Amino acid sequence: MLWKDNPLGLFFESNYDQKIKLAVFYNQKPDIADITEEIKYRYNLDSDLSGFSKTFKKDKLLSPIIKRWDGMRPVAANSLYETLIIYIVLQNATVRRSVQMLENLFSNFGAKLVFGGKELSCFWNPNEISKTIEDNLRKLKLGYRAKSIKLISDQFADGKIDEFWLRKQDKETIKKETLKLYGVGPATVWYLLFEVFHFYDSFEHISPWEQKIFSRLLFNKEIVPPEKILKEVDKRWGIWKRLASHYLFEDLFWKRKNQKIDWLEKEIRL
DNA sequence: CGGCAGGTGCGGA
DNA sequence: TCCGCACCTGCC
């Protein structure tokens, strides 16, 4: 974690007694209360999901999933800027390419942190990319995304975006403000609203790969129009529709680890 | 070698 | 407001 320009190594432990133990490795000692508060927000620890669990305890699709994952919530371990970088390298690319792009960025602008027997990559300060030119980014195989990453880094470096102010705004304001960022469109905005800003009903856009999966899960068909899917999730889960979908997806990919799901395998390209 | 992938910005209707 | 298209790169 890069917190206030201070690279930190975080080590989480859970012993299932409803508590999480966090060890912080550092060169320069950070303010622990400060970090605790930030971690609480990023990992969405104070969110009360009992309403969701109770409402859908008997839901045909959700009940077994809630049983298995009760309390699961969306999390963005990274800052808004870092999350945006991740979303941008995911755009229009296979997983392998996204990983390659991010690794290239890490080795050029980030740092390797060694702590607790691990070596992990750390994000960079937006300044680092703001100082460079787009062409240098293109050399890192970012393709046309180089422009988005450069412009977004500029905006963060110039202090034009205030993540902590945004966290206190309503959905429409956040949507409006983040859409101003170059390279951020509908798909990215809806992920942000859910994962970074914790709006459990934010579900107004479906990307092609999600469309295929929802078509199977909800209609048992190969492909169903996006509008029909959006209507269906709203009808089934109302104000919890995005969270409900998250439970479905997480459970599906968890199942995939143990058993082969033929129709899904076809869709996954590494 | 053309098509396409976990989208988006842009120009024109 | 809606639609078609180009766009980096790498894999199929």
Image (tube, coloured by chain):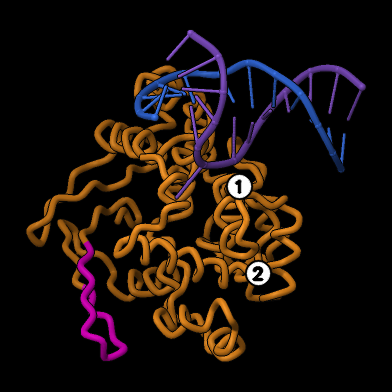
Chain colours: A orange, B purple, C blue
Find the magenta span and give its range: A10-22
Q: Residue furthest left?
A: A117
**Residue for point 54% across, 39% down:** A155
Image location of residue A121, percent across then percent down: 23, 46
On whether residue A11 falls in the magenta region, the answer is yes
Report whether residue A77 is seen.
yes
Query: Which residue is denoted by mark 1 in the rendering?
Result: A207
The CA distance from mark 1 to mark 2 is: 17 Å
| Residue position for label 2 | A201
A19 vs A253: above or below: below
Q: Left or right of A163: which side holds A75?
A: left
The image position of residue A212, as x and y in percent, is 58, 50
Count of numbered circles on the image = 2
Q: Is residue A131 above or below residue A57?
A: above
Give me the chain letter of mark 2.
A
The secondary structure type at the circle numbered 2 is: loop
Pair 1/2: label in front:
1
Q: Quadrant of residue A171?
A: bottom right
Residue A157 located left or right of residue A202: left
Q: Amino acid at mark 2?
A: Asp
